[in-house]
Amino acid sequence: YRNRRFQAYSALGLVVIAVIVTVAVVVTTQKTKEKNAANNKNFVQPSPPTLAPTTSRDVSGVKEFLERNVLFGNITFDSIVAGYVNATAGNTTAGDGNSTIGNVTLGDGNSTMGNITEDMTTFAELEAEDPRLVALDWILHQDAMQLEVYDDNLSQRYIMGLLAVAWDSESWDRCGAVVEDDAENMEETGSTLGNDSSTCTVTNNATGLVQIFQRWLSDADECDWYGVLCSGGFVRSIELAENNLIGEIVPELGMLPFLQIIDLSSNCIFGTIPSSIGQLSYLTNMDLKDNGLSGNIPMELFNLTNLVKLDLSYNVNYDGNCTRFDGTEKEIPNSLGLEGMILDSNIGRLEYLQDIDLTDNYFSGSISPEIGKLKQLGRMVVDNNVFKSTVPDEITQLINLKELWLSMNYFTGGIPENIGALKSLESFSMWENEDLTGHIPDSLYDLTMLEDLHLFRNSFSGSISTQIGRLTKLKTLTLAENNFTGTLPTELGLCQDLEFLRIEMTDIEGSAPKEVCDLTEKNLFSDDRDKEYFKADCLEDNVTMVAFFVCDCCSSCCDHDTNVCTILNRQ
């Protein structure tokens, strides 16, 4: 009996002790919280992102699979979200705009790809900004295919969906994703699509035929989407030229291993070319002309040793009309064009190249002698850049060249002496390289296939050889604004196809030979009175009343001393 009473008292004592300890812990904790709150009264903790309810698709392993096999640069979907949380918590590194947040590089501040901005306040805003997350939501919850990790085309379909999101497919001129309001309108009013919002019609401009395609982000196989060609189930070609694509080239494009053709020309593509482009080892054609691309060309581009065509032209001062589907204008960062020494020694690695166009960019450096290795090159156009070097003799080894344009740069020296080795050359332009000097090599007159020769606005000298009559296919000859001397050879009259001739602001004197004037009765003529098809220093001097060059058949005459020109009204 005494033992039982002792045990009861002991149990009661333990309960009392436990209550006292619990009260003490609660009081201490509350005081600590109050103290911390007082110390941080100016800090506001951001609200956590509002996550969608977890579904079976969220835990299917698809997200993890895409992270391992698709996302470029060891980025994970969670790190993108973490980047958002850190940014809103004030953990963004300040400085020149090149900081990294949650493994997402912000770049120059003009990027929207992975651009976690300080004014984001909800997870929904983050999804709306980052194409990778939007595409993930589409592949998990919206895509009717509901692919799993064991489906062969899971990665490919995600990447294609990502391209649609990154390039604002709702705003495309042809066959982009259907805006929800448009889909409802189709159901209510009917359309040429047969009320099927997954299809679109495109008129072939060449044939006039109307073709039906599957829209991007539709339930159809991605290989059936507009502008996409596949072989063996793998995407081989993406051709979306002139389609109002608005956005950047995402690195994940480089994860389409069998891609051979990519044509995004004449769109609103801005930002840089990602280094991952170098992973497309089967790529033969890359056309990115007429966009707003900028920045250095990635060295990985030279890994594309199967390239046949490379067109990066017209990316300087892009002024595209980038109108989104809702009528708003997308502000595109002003582009200074693509940069880098693209014609250095690495160019020799692209030995299958047949066509390269770099017009209107900011490429610099020199043309490497390695250019001579491109034996299949048929077209080389590098106008309006900042190349500064001599033109290497090795360029005359490109015996398949038909078009060589080196205008509006800073090339020095002269025309390669062995230029006549380019027997297939049809068009040759070196105009506006003010430091080009010397004479026209005799071998140039061996270019009997030549139709266009542009040498104006340089510092060339010497006379025009009588051998020019051998260029019987010549249609355009511009020698203006040089230091040429002598007279105009009568043999030029043998160029029966000549349509355009300019010799003004030179020291070519004498008079226009009858044989040349006779050409104005053939092709050297235009019904357009404003066209300066034959221009020379034939305006009479105000004092002597004598022209430096006598020409009774010119369409436009200039004063040799003042360079004042006037168009003549010849009947």
Image (spheres, rainbow, N blue to C red):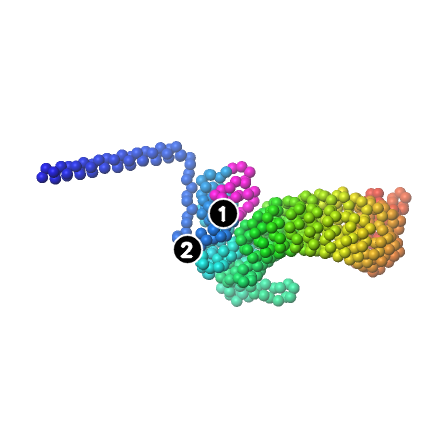
Pinpoint residue 195: horizontal percent, then vertical percent.
51, 65
Label 1 and label 2: CA atoms lie apart by: 21 Å
Residue 104 is one of the magenta-drawn residues:
yes
SS under mark 1:
loop
Residue bearing mark 2 = 60
In front of the other: 91 or 366: 366
Q: Residue at x 40, y 54 (%)?
A: 59
Pinpoint residue 127: horizontal percent, then vertical percent.
47, 50
Residue bearing mark 1 = 74
Q: Which residues are magenta?
A: 94-114
Would you say 452 lies left or right of 292 here?
right
Q: Amino acid at mark 2?
A: Ser
In front of the other: 397 or 82: 397
Determine the main secondary structure of the stretch shown in magenta.
loop
Q: Residue at x 78, y 50 (%)?
A: 418
- Label 1 crowding class (10 Å Cα cut-off): few <14, some 14-19, many 20+? few
Q: Amino acid at mark 1?
A: Asn
In front of the other: 57 or 255: 255
